[in-house]
Amino acid sequence: MKHFKTFTGVLLAASALMSVSAGAVELNIVHGAIGKDNEVLRKELDRYQEMTGNTVNIVSMPESTTDQFGQYKLWLSAKSPDIDVYRIDVIGAPQLADHFVDLTEATADIIDQFVPASVESQTVDGKLVALPMFLGAPALYYRKDLLEKYDRPVPETWDEMTETAKIIMDGERAEGNGDMWGFVFQGAPYEGLTCDGQEWIYSYGGGRIVELDGSIAINNPEAAEALNMAKSWVGTIAPQGVLNYMEEDARGVFQSGNAVFMRNWNYAYALADGPDSPVKGKFDVTTLPVGGEGDSSAATLGGWHLAVSKYSPNQEEAIELVKYLNNFENQKERAIETSRPPTVTAVYDDPEVAEAQPFIPRWKPVVLNALPRPSAATKRKYNEVSSEFWTAVHDTLSGDGTAEQNLAKLEAKLKRLRGNGW
């Protein structure tokens, strides 16, 4: 296969190959991943291979979700038969629906086990585009030992977070840790900044990037206040380099013990609490702060789901693989080992999950009430909408124009994109 590499671990031993039935097939799953995602997936695929005799290769992808989406579009536009199963972002369904098999009938016997909102997010014009794999809703990670040391409460507003971050950062640096920062987040110009940016704006009462009815009201004083607040972090409580940070960059700083606060997804919890982590037992999570009294916390709805390509020569086997990977046992394993919130409802109530990852049952209401990106409202134009939004936010953070100027430009660009309708 061209244009990508496969994991060497997918090769079966010679003795196993001899036992494969004549009807066995080779499947390829494209699976952009961070943290322990691919490690856990490989274990699940190895079990699947032993059960079925089929072989499954993992096609690795870059960390950037934006880069992943771009590659997916290339493969699908070319009707490539090389990929059987795609792990797609929650926002991908409306944009890529035409390229995937309708899973409605194939999952009719299990679909009621899944969180209804996750199924709804993957249903386009009555077609189930992908079977939900795991959900996500980011948290504010904080060093509970340092908050206790400096007698600071867990912040509820962004102003409180900013003040506490500065006090602790300055204090720790004065004691000799010159690498300490107050706050790290995803500031690079990609889909991750769209998530961060919409959280800041919504939590200040600035509305959505595009409203649910397709209207555009992002150019408002509350949105500008939120972006000005975020700009104030860069070079003060956050390193200048945060303008190039993605998820793993932020996690690396926090997990090494060099950040007081971090905005990140659920996967980071299991890693930061791992046996070799310098911050194991020293941190906790809370909901993301609000702008002020009366405002609502906003956590972007995340998650990745499994779709079967219409161009796969092995659609039946691919569908069975998707169902297998999303069964209760595998979702439970992922929840325990990767702290990924499940899409099978019963996993949230499993006592072993609660013991291993108490974060999971705690986060269920946050996940179920998370803020979706405007992919449903903007349909196939979402990718362009997101790009314009993250560009405006990044320009503001970088000092390339004021928040007010960049929001005015964004409004004009979004209206041009919308034209007579999304």
Image (spheres, rainbow, N blue to C red):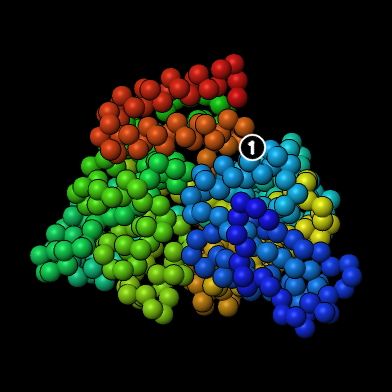
Q: Residue at the location (68% across, 64% down)?
A: 57
| 329 relative position to 404: left or right | right
Three-letter amino acid code of the residue under disc 1: Gln
Q: Nearer the viewer, residue 389 or 294?
A: 389
Give the secondary structure at mark 1. Answer: helix
What residue lies at 18% left-to-right and 55% top-to-bottom? 166
Identity of the residue furthest to the front in this view: 2
Judged from this view, the residue extending furthest toward the right is 22
Q: Is residue 113 left or right of residue 40?
A: right
Residue shown at 37% from the left, 57% from the top: 249
Residue at x 79% of width, y 77% of height = 17
Relative horizontal placement of residue 415, taking residue 277 as reference (left or right)? right
From the image, tell me which residue sits under label 1.
Answer: 95
- The number of numbered badges drawn on the structure is 1
Q: Residues within 10 Å of mark 1 (few under 14, many from 20)?
A: some
The part of the image, by quadrant, that contains residue 72 is top right
Q: Answer above or below: position of 83 versus 335.
A: above
Q: Position of residue 123 (x, y in %)?
A: 70, 43
